[in-house]
Image: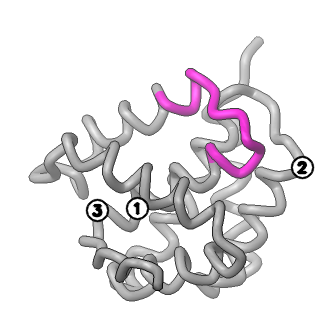
Amino acid sequence: MTAPLPSLSPQDALVAVMVAVSASDEDIRTSELVAIERMVNHMPIFGTYDIDRIPTVAQTVYSLFTEEDGLDALFGLVREGLPEKLWETAYALACDVAAADGILHQPELRMLEEIRGELSIDRLHSVAIEWSARVRHMTS
């Protein structure tokens, strides 16, 4: 029998979404980890967040990725822990992580599509969020 899944705080859920995008292509890049750390250290939503929770949340995501219905379980945890008003925030953070290395890989694009669907992100809003992530991470 599988151990019960932990519940996630709203901040844990945001971290889980970012880690999921980073891990989606099975190659967690330093630039993605730096982007996650930077966002956790500087965004107001993480003002009281204990950064020592990041490895635990990341391990939960990695473990779920090895299970048959792990992605569904992950999104269940995220929806349960994250108020709907933060769903677009989660998508924006996911887009920033995906764009952090300057290249959007197919698995990352598929994960972003999953997040968009699971969190009911309006198509017009998602395009604006994606565009803003792209321009923030452009190089010369």
- Find numbered disc 2 in the image and state the secondary structure of the residue it sits on: helix
Numbered tag placed on residue 11 in the rendering: 3
Q: Which residue is drawn at 61% across and 34% down?
A: 136
Helix, strand or loop under label 1: helix
Q: Residue at x 51, y 71 (%)?
A: 88
Residue 40, relative to residue 126: is it above or below? above
Distance from Cα at disc 1 to Cα at disc 2: 22 Å
Along the line of sight, which residue is nearer the eye, 111 or 5?
5
What span is colored magenta in the figure? 22-33
Looking at the image, residue 54 sits to the left or right of residue 91; the answer is: left
- Closer to the N terminus: mark 2 or mark 3? 3
CA–CA distance in space, label 1 to label 3:
5 Å
Give the colour scheme of this rendering: one colour
Classify 10 Å Cα crowding around label 1: few (below 14), some (14-19), many (20 and above): many
For the residues labelled 1 and 3, say whether their Cβ atoms are less than 8 Å apart.
Answer: yes
Image location of residue 36, percent across then percent down = 44, 38
Q: Is there a contact, CB below 8 Å, between mark 1 and mark 2?
A: no
Q: Mark 3 and mark 2 in contact (Cβ < 8 Å)?
A: no
Quadrant location of residue 118? bottom right
Find the distance from the CA under tag 2 to the CA under tag 3: 27 Å
Q: Mark 2 points at which residue?
A: 106
Determine the residue positioned at 53% across, 59% down.
63
- Tell whether 32 sits left or right of 25: left
Q: Which of marks 1 and 2 is nearer the N terminus?
A: 1
Q: Which mark is residue 107?
A: none
Query: For residue 77, which quarter of the picture?
Result: bottom left
Give the amino acid type for the residue marked by disc 2 in the picture.
Answer: Gln
For label 1, the residue is 14
How far from the left and from the top, in percent, is residue 50?
A: 14, 47
